[in-house]
Amino acid sequence: MRLNFWYIFRFVLRRELNIRKERQTVNIIYEGAFLTATNDYSYIVHKWHGTCSIGVEIDDHRFERGGFMKTKKLMTPVLLVGLLFSMLITPSSASPNVSPTKDKQEAKQPATKIYIPKEVKEVLIKGLPTREARKDIPFSIFKSTFLPAQNAFYIFTFLKIKNSDLGYAPVPAPQVADAAVPAQPKLRAAFHVFLQFHKMENGTPTQVIKEVYVPAAEEEDAANYDPNKEEWYSFGYPLLPGNYLLAMAVTSKDLKKIGTQYFEFSLPQASAFAQELGTTPILFLKDYKEVDSIEKVTALHRGAMRFSLLQIVPNIDNTLSVGDSLDLFLTILGAQPDAQNKYDIECQYEVKKGDESVIKFALAKYENPYISQPLPMKRPIQITKGTEVSQEEKDLPAGSYTLTLKIADKISGKTCVKAIDFTVK
């Protein structure tokens, strides 16, 4: 259901001003317009030019920081218990955060927008034909997933980087320190991430459709720092359906070290679900929480992913401990609502070990296609004592298993079967 613009405006304004009482100005983006609002609801509407208020400490204004926001706010049933307000993003041309200028005269002069510096772009293009990675800063892209964003998708990419390759260095101690609470030594790494999205046609990268600069910085207590630990990171970006190649670079602040990787992915067209249902890639969740604001530019997140007002910690290796539940997270694609905009979806969950059925859950029913479903990993055990037969539930023992989902849309008649492997240790 489409909400009235002014309702959205007042809702967001009240929310932002209540959260940040010390700030009197709130920026709201809607339908390609950028509004600067104050607490008396006065506002100025002007074209979106971005803001340098995000990540100023770590930003490098030699490069434009590409935004991704022409936005539409919708009230939509969204996964995860208790959270129904979500923002679905429609991609558009990048909206850069323009570097501040010294005076108004300079601000009027047209500036060349540089998202990826020349020396980095040359390295990315050089490795494109063979997908050969440069390993000045070694990193790997190990998976991706996507979530619906109105008529598009929000693609999330996951990568791993070893701490020692990011150039962590001691953070200077604060000049004014509390003698009663001595400051713990910290280490900090600051680096650049550059993204270049290529359209793929017949297996060949064609035009570059988007370039994005992502400034990044990580901080760690010196006592906890492990140079050999490989951390995982994620970032998200909205794109229309299609086939893509991501050319990615991670560089040192001075650009003397450049690491690259290449990653192909596809975002499905609506026509793919004309005959049968589909799903977004199935995720297992470890944790999630609601955050204060929606991300307006692409950012790198360590150990988590950001979507709308959610910070999600996925189970990236699909591994559980004995006694853990399995928390499922997906969206069903291609289902049809009825005249009251309600869905009638059924899903049969079953855990198998090889061909053997280990757990078969009761049939689950849903009135919307956004699924967050906890599944207790308890298997029924039949116990016989003499002539008495009883049943108990035991934790699923260690081993390798497959979760199958048999999904049916009772309105359209379309179905699909999905499966995902997991391990219990």
Image (cartoon, rainbow, N blue to C red):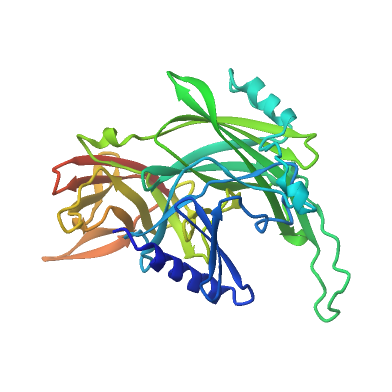
Which quadrant, please, contains the N terminus? bottom left
Q: Nearer the viewer, residue 398 or 274?
A: 274
Picture quarter containing residue 251?
Answer: top right
Q: Position of residue 362 (x, y in %)?
A: 19, 58
Camera-side residue: 42 or 67? 42
Among the 4 quarters of the image, the one containing residue 246: top right
In the picture shown, does residue 361 fall above or below 83? above
Name the residue at 53% across, 24% down.
Answer: 207
Q: Quadrant of residue 379?
A: bottom left
Along the line of sight, which residue is nearer the eye, 196 or 232?
196
Whole-percent x, y for residue 289 in the image: 48, 65
For image coordinates 60% across by 77% down, the residue present is 21
In the rendering, at what x and y percent does residue 88 appear? 41, 53
Q: Is residue 390 left or right of residue 100?
A: left
221 shown above or below 132 = below
Q: What residue occupies the far left of the structure in this picture?
A: 387
Q: Is residue 425 visible?
A: no
